[in-house]
Structure formats: C-alpha cells, structure tokens
Image (tube, grey):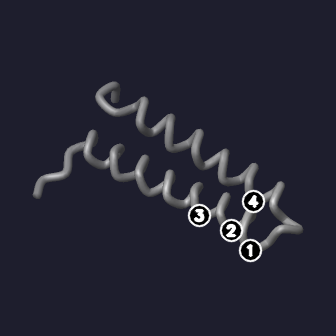
Amino acid sequence: MAMNKNTIFAWASFLTFLVGTALVLLGVLKYKEYAIGFSVTGIGFFFISWVFNALKGRI
C-alpha cells in the first residue's frame, strides 16, 4: 500500500483525534480531580486533528 501525503495526514488526524478522545475520557471518568487539565489538553488534540484534516490536499 503506497502512502502519499494525504493518506499520512488522514492517519495523523485520526490518531490525534483518538488521543484527544482518550484524554477527555480519562479526565471525566478516572481522574476527576484533574478533569479540567485533561479536558483542555484533549480539546487541544481535537484542534490539532482538525488542522491536520484541513491540510489534506493543500500541501
């Protein structure tokens, strides 16, 4: 399977979205005393994922 730059951006976007989701869920479900920090970091990962998705086809 040949991976071009659009495929790499798609995988990077998907994986950063998964990490962001995991961070938000960890903060909400397991570490309630640190929920704000985990959630803010998870939302940051969501934004990075959105940027990677927006870069597909433009670079």
Which of the two residues, 2 or 54, is positioned nearer the viewer here? 54
Residue 24 horizontal side relative to residue 8, left or right: right
Q: Compared to 39, does 53 lie above or below?
A: above
What secondary structure is found at the residue carrying circle 1? helix
Residue 16 horizontal side relative to residue 36, left or right: left
Q: Quadrant of the C terminus?
A: top left
Residue 26 is marked as: 2
Q: Which residue is mark 3?
A: 22
Amino acid, disc 3? Ala
Is label 3 or label 1 in front?
1
Is label 4 or label 1 in front?
1
The mark that comes first in sequence, 4 or 1, is 1
Q: Compared to 13, does 37 lie above or below?
A: below
What secondary structure is found at the residue carrying circle 4? helix
Q: Which residue is mark 4?
A: 38
Amino acid, disc 4? Phe
Q: Compared to 52, does 11 lie above or below?
A: below
Amino acid, disc 1? Lys
Residue at figure coordinates x 45%, y 39% from the top left:
52
Q: Which picture quadrant has residue 35?
A: bottom right
Q: Which picture quadrant has residue 47?
A: top right
The mark that comes first in sequence, 3 or 1, is 3
Q: Are the residues flagged by discs 2 and 3 in contact, CB closer than 8 Å?
A: yes
Q: Which residue is mark 1?
A: 30
What secondary structure is found at the residue carrying circle 2? helix
Query: How far is disc 4 from disc 3 in space, using C-alphas?
Result: 9 Å
Q: Are the residues flagged by discs 2 and 4 in contact, CB closer than 8 Å?
A: yes
Query: How far is disc 2 from disc 4 in space, using C-alphas?
Result: 7 Å
Quick one: label 2, few (<14), some, or many (20+) residues within 10 Å? some
What secondary structure is found at the residue carrying circle 3? helix
